[in-house]
Image (cartoon, rainbow, N blue to C red):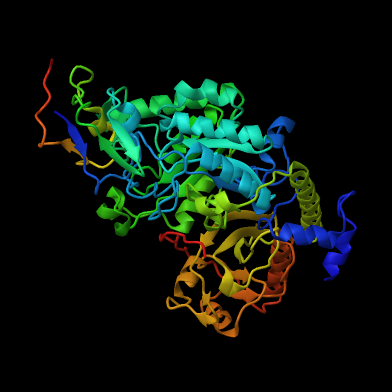
C-alpha cells in the first residue's frame, strides 16, 4: 500500500519530503525513499498523492507493486 | 601613464596611495561608470537621482548597481533544491537553465554548511558584500532552509546583505518573514502578466496541495507574483524583476510586463536571453525554441528603458556562484575545502577594503567626466559599440586570449554606456589557439567596432581586422569608460580626416553553452 521513488529518476530536490502528510519520506546520503509502512497513497488526506503532484520529474514517484494497494479505511 | 599621474590628485582624501588603491581594486570588479545620472543599466552610475536610503542599499550590491558590479562580489548558496513550478526552459535534472547556467548541478548545502561557507568566503574575498539564495530550485519553496541560513549568517556576519530569488508563487505568505529578517533585496521572475502566454511557458504549478495546469496555473502564478511584488514594495524592500526573453512567445509582451512591474514599484528590470539547446533537455531546447540575438535583446531593453532602470550586466549565474559577476570562484569553496579552512571574520578589514573601493570609484568618475568634457562641441551622430577585455577594478587589464567575456559599451557624443557582456570560450589555451579558433569570438563581437585589450597577439589581431573589428592596445591598464570615450574621440577624428570610413555593424550571437570557470 504505497508509492516508491525510482532512484534513477530522482533529482534529490527534496520537494516531496515536506509535502507528505504521513512523514513517510526520508533522505539518507542524498537518496530519498518512501517508508511503505507509513505511506497511505494520501487516501483520506488529499485528492492526489502529494509526492506525485509536486515531483518535477514525471514517472519518479510510482506505485510499489510489491506491496498491496492502499484503500480507504 | 600620464593620465594615471594626473589622476593621483583626484584620489579621495584619506586614501592611502593611489597605486595601493589600484592594486587592491584590481582584484575586484570590472569597469565603471561615472558619478552623475543613470546610464541605463542597473542603477548605473553614481547615486544620481536615487534617494539616499535607496543608494545606501544598492551602492555595494553587484546585481542592483551596474557600477558596483565592477568592484563587489556576491555569492549564492545552494540550500534550496525544491521547486514548486515547472518552466519550459528548465530541466530539473540540472539547475535551472536560465536563472543558473545550464547543464550544471550545484553542490547542495545544509543551512549550517552554507553559513560556514559564507563566512569562509567573506574572510577570503573582502569585496563579497552580498549573499543570495537563488536555488537551485526556488528559495521560497524551501522556506525553512532559506530562513535558517539567513539567521545563521546574520549572527556571524551582520554586514552582509541578504537577498533571495523566487518565482513568486509562495511570496505573499513570506513577505512578513522576509521583512523581519532584514532581507532587503528580492528578485521575482516574472515572464508574463497574461495567463494565455504563461500557459506556453509554465506547464504546471503545485499550489494548495495540487497541481494546476494550463491557463489556470498561470492565472494563479501571475496573481501571486504581482501581489507579492506590491507587498514587498509597500514595505520598502527593493525588488528586481527577472524576465526570460523567449522570441515568439513573450518578447513583445515583456513591454507589458515592464509596465506592470514598474507601476507596482519594482526597482530594476532584468530582461535575460533564453538559453536553449537540445542537450539541456528542456522543453524549449527539444522543440528548437531559439533564444534572442544580442541586438534583439538590446532593442527590447532599450524599449523598456524609460523611468525604470534596466539591468544589463546579469550573467545568469549559478545557484552556487562565488565572486564577481563575470567570474566564478565556487571551485575554491567546496564543502570539503570550507570545512578545512581556518576562518576569522574580520569586519574592520572588510570595511577598510570597501572604503578603498569607494575612493577608487570616485577617481574613476572624475576621469570619466574629464574625458567626456573633451567631447564637448562634437556634433557627430555616430554611435558605436566597443568591447572591453577586463578582469576587474574598472580597468582594461585582460589579455584578449585570456578573456572569458567581453564587456560591451555603446558610445556616442552623449558618453559611454555599458550595454551588456558577451561570454566567450578562451581563445588562448596554454599558449596555443583553441580548437574552435577565433570564429565564435568574431560572432560574439560582430556588433562592435573595436575591442580594447591589455594585449593581443598578431594572429587574432589580423583575424579581427579581417572581420572589421579594430583591436586596440593603446589603453592597456587604463580606466574603461575614460578609454572608451577617448577611443571614440580618436575614431571621430580619423573618420573626419577620412583615414577610416564609419560602417554600421551587424548583429551578434549570445553564447548558449554552459559557462565553466577555469
Q: Is residue B283 visible?
A: yes
> Which residue is pictured at 90% across the width and 58% down the height?
B9
Total label count? Answer: 0
User: Can you tell which quarter of the image residue A14 is in?
Assistant: top left
Task: Please state which of residues B173 and B284 is positioned toward the viewer in this rendering.
Answer: B173
User: Can you tell which quarter of the image residue B383 is in?
Assistant: bottom right
> Which residue is pictured at 10% across the width and 36% down the height?
A65
Q: Is residue B125 left or right of residue B195?
A: right
Task: Please state which of residues B278 and B164 is positioned toward the viewer in this rendering.
Answer: B164
User: Can you tell which quarter of the image residue B25 is in?
Assistant: bottom right
Task: Please state which of residues A30 and B208 is positioned toward the viewer in this rendering.
Answer: A30
Task: Please state which of residues B441 and B120 is positioned toward the viewer in this rendering.
Answer: B120
Instruction: Indicate the position of residue B83 as horizontal and vertical percent values.
Output: 37, 36
In the picture, the quarter occupied by the N terminus of chain B is bottom right
Which residue is outermost to the top?
A73
Instruction: Indicate the position of residue B353 as horizontal and vertical percent values.
Output: 76, 49
Q: Is residue B301 left or right of residue B492?
A: left
Q: Is residue B310 visible?
A: no
Instruction: Indicate the position of residue B474 as horizontal and vertical percent values.
Output: 72, 74
Compared with A26, B339 (above or below) is below
Instruction: Indicate the position of residue B494 as horizontal and vertical percent values.
Output: 70, 75
Amino acid at each position: 500500500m504505497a508509492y516508491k521513488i525510482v532512484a534513477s529518476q530522482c533529482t534529490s530536490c527534496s520537494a516531496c519530503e515536506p509535502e507528505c502528510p504521513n512523514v513517510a519520506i526520508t533522505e539518507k546520503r542524498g537518496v530519498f525513499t518512501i517508508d511503505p509502512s507509513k505511506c497511505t497513497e494520501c487516501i483520506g488526506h488529499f485528492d492526489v498523492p502529494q509526492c506525485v503532484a509536486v515531483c518535477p520529474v514525471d514517472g519518479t514517484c510510482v506505485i510499489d507493486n510489491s506491496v498491496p494497494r492502499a484503500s480507504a479505511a | 601613464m600620464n593620465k594615471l599621474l594626473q589622476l593621483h590628485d583626484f584620489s579621495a582624501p584619506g586614501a592611502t596611495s593611489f597605486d595601493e588603491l589600484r592594486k587592491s581594486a584590481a582584484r575586484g570588479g570590472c569597469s565603471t561608470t561615472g558619478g552623475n545620472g543613470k546610464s541605463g543599466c542597473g542603477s548605473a552610475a553614481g547615486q544620481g537621482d536615487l534617494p539616499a536610503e535607496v543608494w545606501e542599499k544598492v551602492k555595494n550590491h553587484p546585481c542592483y548597481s551596474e557600477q558596483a558590479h565592477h568592484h563587489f562580489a556576491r555569492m549564492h548558496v545552494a540550500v534550496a533544491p525544491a521547486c514548486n513550478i515547472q518552466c519550459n526552459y528548465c530541466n530539473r535534472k540540472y539547475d535551472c537553465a536560465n536563472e543558473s547556467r545550464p547543464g550544471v548541478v550545484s553542490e547542495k548545502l545544509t543551512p549550517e554548511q552554507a553559513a560556514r561557507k559564507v563566512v569562509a568566503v567573506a574572510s577570503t574575498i573582502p569585496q563579497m558584500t552580498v549573499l543570495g539564495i537563488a536555488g537551485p530550485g526556488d528559495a521560497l519553496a524551501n522556506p525553512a532552509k532559506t530562513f535558517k541560513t539567513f539567521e545563521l549568517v546574520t549572527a556571524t556576519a551582520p554586514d552582509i546583505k541578504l537577498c533571495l530569488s523566487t518565482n513568486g508563487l509562495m511570496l505573499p505568505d513570506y513577505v512578513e518573514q522576509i521583512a523581519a529578517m532584514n532581507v532587503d533585496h528580492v528578485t521575482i521572475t516574472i515572464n508574463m502578466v497574461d495567463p494565455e502566454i504563461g500557459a506556453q511557458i509554465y506547464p504546471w504549478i503545485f499550489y494548495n496541495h495540487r497541481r494546476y495546469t494550463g491557463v489556470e496555473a498561470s492565472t494563479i502564478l501571475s496573481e501571486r507574483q504581482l501581489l507579492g511584488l506590491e507587498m514587498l514594495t509597500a514595505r520598502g524592500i527593493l525588488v528586481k524583476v527577472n524576465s526570460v526573453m523567449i522570441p515568439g512567445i513573450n518578447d513583445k509582451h515583456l513591454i507589458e510586463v515592464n509596465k506592470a512591474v514598474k507601476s507596482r514599484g519594482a526597482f530594476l528590470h532584468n530582461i535575460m536571453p533564453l538559453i536553449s539547446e537540445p542537450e539541456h533537455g528542456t522543453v524549449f531546447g527539444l522543440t528548437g525554441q531559439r533564444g534572442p540575438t544580442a541586438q534583439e535583446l538590446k532593442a527590447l531593453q532599450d524599449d523598456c528603458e524609460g523611468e525604470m532602470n534596466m539591468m544589463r550586466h546579469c550573467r545568469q549565474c549559478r545557484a552556487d556562484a562565488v565572486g564577481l559577476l563575470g567570474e566564478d570562484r565556487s571551485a575554491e569553496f567546496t564543502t570539503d575545502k570550507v570545512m578545512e579552512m581556518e576562518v576569522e571574520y574580520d569586519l574592520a578589514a572588510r570595511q577598510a577594503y570597501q572604503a578603498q573601493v569607494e575612493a577608487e570609484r570616485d577617481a574613476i568618475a572624475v576621469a570619466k567626466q574629464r574625458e567626456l568634457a573633451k567631447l564637448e562641441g562634437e556634433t557627430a551622430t555616430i554611435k558605436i559599440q566597443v568591447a572591453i577585455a577586463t578582469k576587474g577594478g574598472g580597468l582594461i587589464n585582460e589579455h584578449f586570449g585570456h578573456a572569458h567575456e567581453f564587456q560591451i559599451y555603446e558610445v556616442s557624443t552623449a558618453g559611454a554606456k555599458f550595454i551588456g557582456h558577451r561570454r566567450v570560450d578562451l581563445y588562448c589555451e596554454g599558449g596555443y589557439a583553441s580548437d574552435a579558433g577565433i570564429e565564435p569570438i568574431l560572432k560574439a563581437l560582430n556588433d562592435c567596432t573595436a575591442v580594447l585589450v591589455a594585449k593581443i597577439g598578431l594572429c587574432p589581431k589580423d583575424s579581427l581586422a579581417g572581420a572589421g573589428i579594430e583591436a586596440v592596445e593603446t589603453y592597456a591598464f587604463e580606466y574603461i569608460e575614460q578609454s572608451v570615450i577617448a577611443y571614440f574621440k580618436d575614431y571621430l577624428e580619423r573618420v573626419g580626416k577620412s583615414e577610416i570610413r564609419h560602417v554600421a555593424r551587424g548583429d551578434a550571437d549570445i553564447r548558449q553553452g554552459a559557462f565553466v570557470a577555469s
